[in-house]
Image: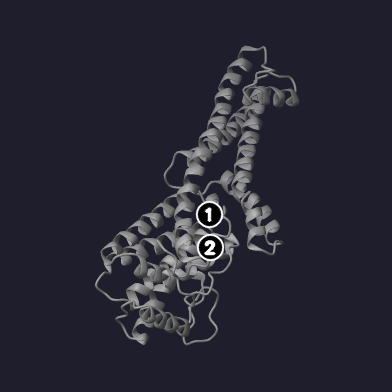
Amino acid sequence: MDLLLRGIAILLVSVILITFLLSMARTTLLNRRRRDPLLSLATRFVHAIVVKLARKRKSDEDVARVTVWYMPLFVLILISIWFSVVLFAFAILYWESAAETTFFDSLISSGSALSTLGFDTPSTPQGQVIAIIEGAFGLMIVIFFFSFIPGYQSTMLARDVRTAWLYERVGPTPTGIDVLLWLYQNMAENEHDDFWASWEDWFRQLRVTHVLAPEVIYTPSSFSNQSWVVCSHALLDAAAFHLAAVDKRSVAAPHLCMKVGASAMREVSATLGFAPDHLPAPPTGLPAPPDGQPTEAQFVAGIEQLKAAGVPVAASDAEAWAQFSGMHAVYGPPLHHIFEQTLTRRYPGLLTTKKSTLPE
């Protein structure tokens, strides 16, 4: 009977430690995020707390003051979960190997080794060997803490600097028309491809960083009243509008930008639980559309605004609207889901906006 219990204890410890090692590897080493029970537990716990508190706030700035704590809380909770499961697993080993006489003493010895403090190392040889091994696990957690923060800060900086770049040029409520107006008023035609290529790279980085570290999705911009989600929607609308209605002499660069951006939004939204197969079909005709869906009247108003600013519009209104609405149906629903999940204010004005006159 004792042999059976010992075998069960060793099997349980092995499962717990393998689960911990896989969780740490998926968080820090693997370049593809997979579902992990410990990561999911931390994410759900933090998300429930932050969302509950943020929904009570009325202004965008108040919401940002709450959501900015998402990442720090996630790191704290995840480390606490890791610490607890490893602490419990090695406590079983101390107790089962008779290095300690009671389970409470085993927990104390486990905490001593895992915290790398060594204030209560067992005097038995088997207990000292276990303490050495557990100390290595403790060092893994400490190294994760100090290596994760610089990577997180670098990800946030790269995203927010580009977001601020756009806001500073098109104003506090960027839309697709704003982006196109600024582009045609402030950049030479031979520079347009570079503009779209730079934002294509931005979307590609978003796809990598925000899928591998979904916690970053919820973290607001470092700059007040700015949003990477709103920025993404404005750029995708601008690219789609350009492809549908603006002079077709240069389409490769905006097409790639929209293709990469739409793919990035779909992957990020899937990380947040977006299921496109379960969505209702997009509405036909012109009833009041759901949030994030432009109307044909707004689209026509955007065309007139571009014409008034001297932007070369090539296609007819009806033809352009059909092309634009088809492209918007690809990236609109995923973006709508991201807006909902991150408690981001609605994409302001969609295609109906003021004229951008800010200098480069």
- Residue 338's label in the rendered image is 2
Q: Callout 2 environment at 10 Å: few (<14), some (14 to 19), or many (20+)?
A: many
Give residue 335's position: percent from left, percent from top.
49, 66
**Cβ–Cβ below 8 Å for labels 2 and 1?**
yes
- Residue that appears at 65% across and 35% down: 84
Q: Nearer the viewer, residue 148 or 190?
A: 190
- Residue that appears at 47% across and 87% down: 285
Q: Earlier in the sequence, mark 2 or mark 1?
A: 1
Q: Callout 1 environment at 10 Å: few (<14), some (14 to 19), or many (20+)?
A: many
Q: Nearer the viewer, residue 11 or 360?
A: 360
Q: Quadrant of the N terminus?
A: top right
Residue 5 in view, yes or no: yes
Q: Nearer the viewer, residue 129 or 181?
A: 181
SS assignment at label 1: helix
Residue 211 in view, yes or no: no
Number of marks: 2
Q: Is residue 345 left or right of residue 185?
A: right
Task: Using the image, determine if residue 282 lies above or below residue 225.
Answer: below
Q: Is residue 105 left or right of residue 323?
A: right
Task: Quote the CA–CA distance across marks 2 and 1.
Answer: 9 Å
Task: Using the image, determine if residue 84 lies above or below residue 246.
Answer: above
Give residue 246's position: percent from left, percent from top.
32, 76
Task: Using the image, determine if residue 40 lies above or below residue 94.
Answer: below
Amino acid type, residue under disc 2 in the picture: Ile
Q: Nearer the viewer, residue 185 or 123?
A: 185
Amino acid type, residue under disc 1 in the picture: Ile
Q: Quadrant of residue 128?
A: top right
- Residue that appears at 40% across and 57% down: 203
- Residue 217's label in the rendered image is 1
- Residue that appears at 64% across and 38% down: 80
- Residue 6's label in the rendered image is none
SS assignment at label 2: helix
